Image: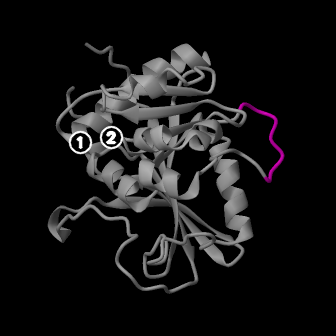
């Protein structure tokens, strides 16, 4: 049913408060980090062929995920949205302006979904130069995530005429957590901002016990304005012991 490609190197990038919050309990995250750290994020985006967010994050923020605010004359990274439950597809049916906004900008957007039916009518309106739906069906979410990324690699190389070797995941907290649980993270870039928010809703985690929790090796740290950027690589073998699809 599917051709399966290789997996890209995955960088998870987020900014959080001292108490681990990626947003406050009203879902506001702009801006936890300062100007210098956000400018660094754009430099990091420029080193990846694609930037990924979850459906909820996209619908809340309408994330552009482009490289800006720095000198950059290269090809913009593609935007990838994971939509396993079809929330973006449903929103596109209900809001024609959202479809227009998705197809604006200097790069193509890939919508990853396992909803194979019922949305062919809206997909007929997609401009393939701007918006593509990558379909993959699997009952287990972790296996779906692995398979969808492999399928994306194949579609990406055909449509972009370049390889997808480096993928950057920017949020939200649930999506970042799922990539960690699935063993898909190779590197973490975490900006710590000098704020304390409280709350429990917007935190990255794996639900692991201390005895079997993933360990990360610090590669470097850097101060960016009032924020501290920590770079880690994954020490456990989870990023190489992939599920077989």
In magenta segment, residue 72: yes
Q: Which residues are magenta?
A: 69-75
Where in the figure is residue 69, as x and y percent of width and height? 79, 53
Where in the figure is residue 51, as x and y percent of width and height? 55, 42
Disc with the residue nearer the chain's start (1 vs 2): 2
Which sits in the foreground, 49 or 22?
22
10 Å crowding of disc 1: few (<14), some (14-19), many (20+): some
10 Å crowding of disc 2: few (<14), some (14-19), many (20+): many
Splitting the image into 4 quarters, where does residue 222 fall? bottom right
Report the disc number at residue 82.
none
Position of residue 95 relative to residue 34, above or below, is: above
Tell me the SS state at disc 2.
loop
Q: Which residue is mark 1?
A: 141
Using the rendered image of the protein, determine whether residue 81 is visible from the camera's viewpoint. Answer: no
Instruction: Tell whether 105 sits left or right of 193.
Output: right
Tell me the SS state at disc 1.
helix
Q: Which residue shows up at 47% across the image and 19% down it?
A: 155
Instruction: Tell whether 182 sits left or right of 223.
Output: left
Q: Are marks 1 and 2 in contact (CB under 8 Å)?
A: yes
Which sits in the foreground, 120 or 27?
120
Q: How many marks?
A: 2
Q: Which residue shows up at 47% across the image and 28% down it?
A: 122
Where in the figure is residue 15, as x and y percent of width and height? 54, 66
Q: Which residue is mark 2?
A: 84
Using the rendered image of the protein, determine whether residue 42 is visible from the camera's viewpoint. Answer: yes
In magenta segment, residue 118: no
Instruction: Tell whether 117 sits left or right of 210.
Output: right
Position of residue 236 relative to residue 22, above or below, is: above
Most frequent secondary structure within the magenta stretch:
loop
């Amino acid at each position: 049913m599917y051709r399966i490609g290789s997996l890209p190197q995955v960088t998870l990038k987020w900014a959080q408060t001292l108490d681990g919050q990626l947003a406050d309990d009203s879902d506001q995250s702009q801006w936890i980090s300062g100007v210098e750290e956000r400018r660094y994020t754009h430099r990091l985006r420029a080193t990846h062929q694609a930037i990924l967010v979850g459906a909820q994050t996209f619908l809340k923020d309408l994330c552009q995920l482009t490289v800006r605010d720095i000198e950059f004359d290269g090809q913009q990274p593609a935007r990838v949205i994971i939509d396993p439950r079809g929330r973006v597809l449903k929103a596109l049916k209900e809001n024609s302006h959202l479809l227009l906004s998705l197809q604006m900008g200097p790069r193509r957007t890939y919508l990853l979904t396992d909803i194979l039916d019922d949305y062919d009518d809206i997909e007929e309106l997609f401009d393939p130069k701007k918006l593509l739906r990558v379909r993959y069906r699997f009952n287990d979410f972790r296996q779906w995530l692995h398979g969808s990324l492999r399928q994306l690699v194949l579609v990406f190389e055909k449509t972009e005429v370049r390889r997808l070797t480096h993928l950057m995941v920017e949020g939200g907290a649930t999506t970042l957590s799922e990539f960690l649980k699935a063993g898909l993270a190779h590197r973490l870039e975490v900006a710590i901002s000098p704020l304390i928010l409280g709350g429990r809703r917007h935190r990255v985690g794996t639900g692991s016990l201390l005895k079997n929790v993933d360990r990360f090796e610090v590669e470097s740290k850097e101060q960016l304005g009032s924020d501290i950027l920590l770079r880690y690589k994954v020490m456990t073998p989870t990023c190489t012991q992939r599920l077989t699809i």
